[in-house]
Amino acid sequence: AQRVTQPEKLLSVFKGAPVELKCNYSYSGSPELFWYVQYSRQRLQLLLRHISRESIKGFTADLNKGETSFHLKKPFAQEEDSAMYYCALSKSFGGAQKLVFGQGTRLTINP
Amino acid sequence: GAGVSQTPSNKVTEKGKYVELRCDPISGHTALYWYRQSLGQGPEFLIYFQGTGAADDSGLPNDRFFAVRPEGSVSTLKIQRTERGDSAVYLCASSLYPGSNSPLHFGNGTRLTVT
């Protein structure tokens, strides 16, 4: 069965420090992976997709098929990065977005 | 422009009652999804519409749950004989077309509490 694991429910770092939010997945096919973010009092929104290989708001994520991981990284955290982050997997590569989400990590950036 | 709109934002109902949750997607979006998010969990897929038809309803937990999208726009999620375990935030999302090149736009959700 497909599964997404985010081992840290809470993560707290200081402003300017590097951030890494961990995500591991279990899927036998070719997954498509995403990071979604929910800022305080806002809607859940897409942050980035692995296939785009882009940097959004300074965040990057690399798909490591050997380690079945898709960790989210940012070299220098900013206070506005405080939010809830969800890693998600699509079982249908390029198709309908029937996503499997992890439990989420609440990131707090301390001033 | 207007995003995905969900009404009501909060719904409290008694066990055994029937509820309807409404979703207004972004105009022109053909794909519509319902997810459910229980406390402390990530969203869980329920059902996906492409146009008027339910293309995939494999996430619906049982036959008390049903959803429609009769004109390919507004969708209604219907829950019969509600149970306390149905308490959750029900999220609707839409996208211009189904593929992952078209980002999902989520609504604010309806928080359902079954007492």
Image: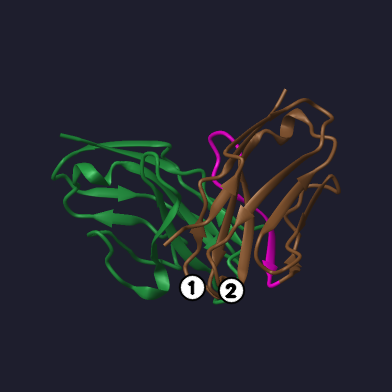
Alpha-carbon distance for marks 2 and 1?
Answer: 7 Å
Q: Considering the numbered disc 1 on the image, is that residue within a helix, a strand or a loop?
A: loop
Considering only vertical position in the picture, is A25 above or below B43?
Answer: below
In x, y percent, where is residue B58?
76, 59
Q: Name the residue under label 2.
A: B98
In x, y percent, where is residue B92?
59, 53
> Looking at the picture, which amino acid does disc 1 mark?
Ser
Seen in the image, is B2 located left or right of residue B48? left
Considering only vertical position in the picture, is A100 above or below B113?
Answer: below
Q: Which mark is on residue B102? A: 1
Q: How crowded is mark 2: few (under 14 residues within 10 Å), some or many (20 or more)?
A: many
Marks 2 and 1: CB-CB under 8 Å? yes
Which lettered chain is shown in brown? B
Colour assigned to chain A in the rendering is green
> Looking at the picture, which amino acid does disc 2 mark?
Pro
Quadrant of the drawing holding the N terminus of chain B: bottom left
For this orientation, the residue located farthest to the top is B115
| Residue at point 72%, 22% (across, down) | B115
Instruction: Give whichever of A24, B60 is nearer the camera.
Output: B60
Instruction: Give whichever of A7, B91 is nearer the camera.
Output: B91
Q: Give the range drawn in magenta.
A: B38-51
